[in-house]
C-alpha cells in the first residue's frame, strides 16, 4: 500500500496455507494504486467467496488496469464469489486482457453467466482466457459467455477451457456463432475434453473457422465417441485454407477416428506452408500403421516444422521406428 508508483504487480502463492484473512488484507491494500497489470495467483489456497468479495470491491478502485489475471484453481468459490469478481472486472473501462482460472470451484452456470455479462460490458477487450473445468458448467453458462463475447468483434485471442463439464452440442453451437463474428482472431484454444460434443457440434466450430483467416495459433481438444472422421475431414478442409497458421494442435482422445480421419489431418499438415509447430493426438482411436506412415511422411516433408508431437497409442513397433527416424531426419 506504500508503493504509490507501482504499476505492475504479480503475487503467486499457489498451494500455500493462505486463508481469507491474509488474502483479504492483501487485496484491500491494492486500492488506489496506479496498477496497469495485476496477476493474483491463489490456486489451491484456502480462500472462499469472502476473498472474492474483497476483490470485487478493490478492482473498481484500479481504473488504469489493462491486464487482469486471476487464478483460483481448487479454491472454495461459488457462483456468489465469482459474481463479485465479475462485477469488479466489469468496472474496468481500460482493460484489454482478462484471464480467469476457476477450475475446481463450484461456480455452476450462474458463475459463468456472471463472467459472460461482465465481458460484454468491457470496451477495449482484446484477449480472454476462462478456465472452468470441473465446475458444474453446462450449456446455459456457455451460452451466456458466448453472448458476452459476441460484443467484441475485434477480439484477438480466446482461450476457453471447458473440460469435464456438462457442455453438449447446443452449447458449442452458441459459441460457434460468437466465433463467426470475430474475423480478426489470431489465437484460439478450445478444450472440450470429456464433454458430450459430437460431429454436429464440431460442425458449427468448423463453420466459424471459415471466417477466421488471421489465425496463427489454433488448438482444439475433443474426447467423445461421436466425434468421427466426418469432423476430421471438415476441420481439415477448413484449417488447410489458413495461410497464416504457424501453430496447430489437434487432439481427438478416444474419438471415432479411423485411418480415413488421420489421412485428412495429414493432408492438412502438408498443405500449411507456414506451420512451424504441430501436435496431433489420436490416443484411443482406431488408427493403424498405414495412417501412421502417412503422418510420418507429412512430418518429413514439412521443412518449416521445428516442433512436432504425435500420439497415436496403437502402433506397431515398425511404425514407431519409422516415425522416430523421419522426425530425426
Image (cartoon, rainbow, N blue to C red):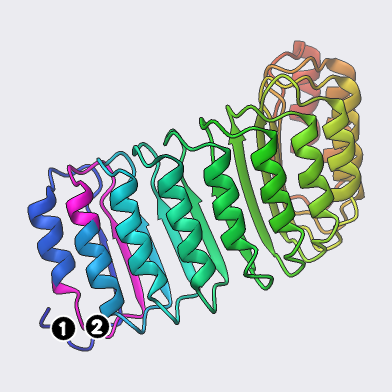
Tell me if residue 158 comes above or below residue 141 in the rendering. below
Q: From which residue to which does the magenta span run?
A: 29-52
**Element assignment for label 1:** loop
Q: Which residue is mark 1?
A: 3
Circle 2 sits on which residue? 6
- Asked whether 51 falls inside the magenta stretch, the response is yes
Q: Please identify the quarter of the rendering in which residue 148 is found.
A: bottom right
Can see residue 301?
no
> 89 left or right of 218?
left
Residue occupying the point 71% across, 19% down: 225
- Mark 2 nearby-residue class (10 Å; few <14, some 14–19, many ≥20): some
Instruction: Please identify the quarter of the rendering in which residue 34 is found.
Output: bottom left
Q: Is residue 237 left or right of residue 220?
A: right
Residue at the (85%, 28%) spot, across then down = 262
- Dot 1 surroundings within 10 Å: few (below 14), some, or many (20 or more)? few
Q: Is residue 233 above or below residue 22?
A: above
Alpha carbon separation for disc pair 1 and 2: 6 Å
* Residue 238 point in image, percent of width and height: 88, 49
232 left or right of 50? right
Amino acid at each position: 500500500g506504500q508503493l504509490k508508483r507501482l504499476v505492475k504487480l504479480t503475487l503467486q502463492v499457489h498451494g500455500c496455507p493462505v486463508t481469507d484473512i491474509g488474502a483479504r488484507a492483501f487485496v484491500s491494500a491494492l486500492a488506489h494504486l496506479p496498477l496497469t497489470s495485476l496477476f493474483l495467483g491463489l490456486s489451491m489456497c484456502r480462500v472462499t467467496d469472502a476473498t472474492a468479495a474483497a476483490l470485487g470491491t478493490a478492482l473498481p478502485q484500479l481504473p488504469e488496469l489493462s491486464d487482469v489475471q486471476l487464478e483460483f484453481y481448487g479454491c472454495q468459490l461459488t457462483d456468489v464469489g465469482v459474481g463479485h469478481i465479475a462485477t469488479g472486472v466489469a468496472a474496468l473501462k481500460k482493460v484489454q486482457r482478462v484471464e480467469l482460472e476457476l477450475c475446481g470451484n463450484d461456480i455452476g452456470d450462474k458463475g459463468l453467466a456472471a463472467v459472460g455479462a461482465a465481458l460484454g460490458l468491457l470496451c477495449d477487450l482484446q484477449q480472454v482466457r476462462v478456465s472452468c473445468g470441473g465446475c458444474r458448467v453446462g450449456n446455459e453458462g456457455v451460452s451466456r459467455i458466448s453472448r458476452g463475447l459476441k460484443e467484441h468483434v475485434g477480439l484477438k485471442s480466446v482461450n476457453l477451457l471447458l473440460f469435464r463439464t456438462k457442455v453438449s452440442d447446443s452449447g458449442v453451437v452458441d459459441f460457434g456463432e460468437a466465433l463467426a463474428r470475430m474475423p480478426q482472431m489470431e489465437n484460439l484454444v478450445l478444450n472440450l475434453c470429456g464433454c458430450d460434443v459430437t460431429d454436429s457440434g464440431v460442425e458449427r466450430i468448423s463453420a466459424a473457422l471459415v471466417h477466421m483467416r488471421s489465425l496463427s495459433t489454433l488448438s482444439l481438444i475433443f474426447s467423445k465417441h461421436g466425434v468421427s472422421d466426418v469432423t476430421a475431414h471438415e476441420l481439415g478442409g477448413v484449417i488447410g485454407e489458413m495461410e497464416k497458421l504457424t501453430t496447430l494442435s489437434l487432439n481427438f482422445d478416444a474419438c471415432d477416428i479411423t485411418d480415413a480421419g488421420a489421412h485428412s489431418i495429414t493432408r492438412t499438415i502438408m498443405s500449411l506452408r507456414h506451420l512451424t509447430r504441430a501436435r496431433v493426438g489420436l490416443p484411443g482411436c482406431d488408427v493403424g500403421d498405414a495412417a501412421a506412415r502417412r503422418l510420418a511422411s507429412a512430418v518429413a516433408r514439412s521443412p518449416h516444422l521445428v516442433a512436432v508431437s504425435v500420439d497415436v497409442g496403437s502402433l506397431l513397433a515398425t511404425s514407431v521406428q519409422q516415425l522416430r527416424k523421419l522426425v530425426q531426419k
